[in-house]
Image (cartoon, helix red, strand yellow):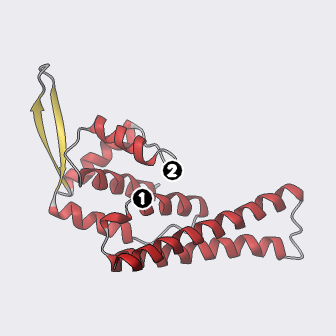
Amino acid sequence: MWYSNHMIDLMILFLLLKRDLTMYAIKKHIADKFAPFTNPSFGALKPALVRLEKSKFITSSKVMSEGGKLSAFYSITDSGVKELRNLLLMPFSKNPLQFISDAKIKLCCASFLSDSDKKHLFDNIKAGAYLHRMNAQKILEDEYSTPDFYQKIVLDNTICEYNNFISMVEGFEKENERNS
């Protein structure tokens, strides 16, 4: 669970790079940009905003709307920009489901990073993908495990997914080298 908190923090900080947002706008932007990978509830966002503000990674200011409603707008601080970088370069979970989701979120935020940091991120993602692919291949090739029909199909598909994921990251690496 602690790892998903880091991903919520990462998404919030990334969105606040562009402009100040209310909690409701943050929720909407997360849905717009990250819904295929995650969908944190307001119950997860509120503690994240409190945690980020307490850590001085964001600040909030109360603004009265034209309709007379008080809204809190959140802004990223210089410390928050540094924390965003740290979160993007943080090691990945060993859990394959968490890895693939987190890797996709981090890739969606990679434009923030310098070229050398992108290379570091891409290397970490490929290392994790190779590891998880190898684990699936081991089960398929283990003469003692003898996967049944359904498990074999799922494992074959998992291996293909990791191969495609690795190819995608290699494409990002080539693009990164071209733009350097």
Direction front: furthest residue: 178
Residue 130 in the image: state x and y as whole percent: 62, 76
Nearer-N-terminus badge (1/2): 2
| Quarter assignment of residue 166 | bottom right
Is label 1 in contact with label 2 (beta carbons under 8 Å)? yes
Q: Is residue 51 left or right of residue 40?
A: left
Q: Quadrant of residue 99?
A: bottom right
Tell me the SS state at disc 2. Answer: loop
Q: Give the image quarter of residue 155.
A: bottom right
Q: Is residue 29 left or right of residue 160?
A: left
Whether residue 43 is situated above or below residue 171 in the rendered picture: above
Q: Between residues 92 and 175, which one lies in front from this camera angle?
A: 175
- Camera-near label (1 vs 2) is 1
Q: Name the residue rendered at 45%, 57% in the picture.
A: 105
How far across and how far down the image is residue 112, in percent? Answer: 30, 65
| Residue drawn at point x = 47 percent, y = 71 percent | 172
Circle 2: residue type: Phe
In the image, 124 versus 58, the foreground residue is 124
Q: Residue drawn at (34%, 64%), measured in percent from left and top?
A: 111
* Residue of label 1: 108
Residue 159 place in picture, x, y as percent: 71, 67
Would residue 37 appear left or right of 68 to someone viewing this image?
Answer: right
Residue found at the very far top of the displayed protein: 67
What residue sits right under mark 2 in the picture? 37
Q: Residues within 10 Å of mark 2 (few under 14, many from 20)?
A: few
> Residue 16: x and y, percent?
24, 51
Q: Which residue is nearer to you in this view: 95 or 159? A: 159
The amino acid type, in three-letter code, at marker 1 is Cys
Cα distance, mark 1 to mark 2?
10 Å
Helix, strand or loop under label 1: helix
In which quadrant is the C terminus drawn? bottom left
Q: Disc count in the image? A: 2
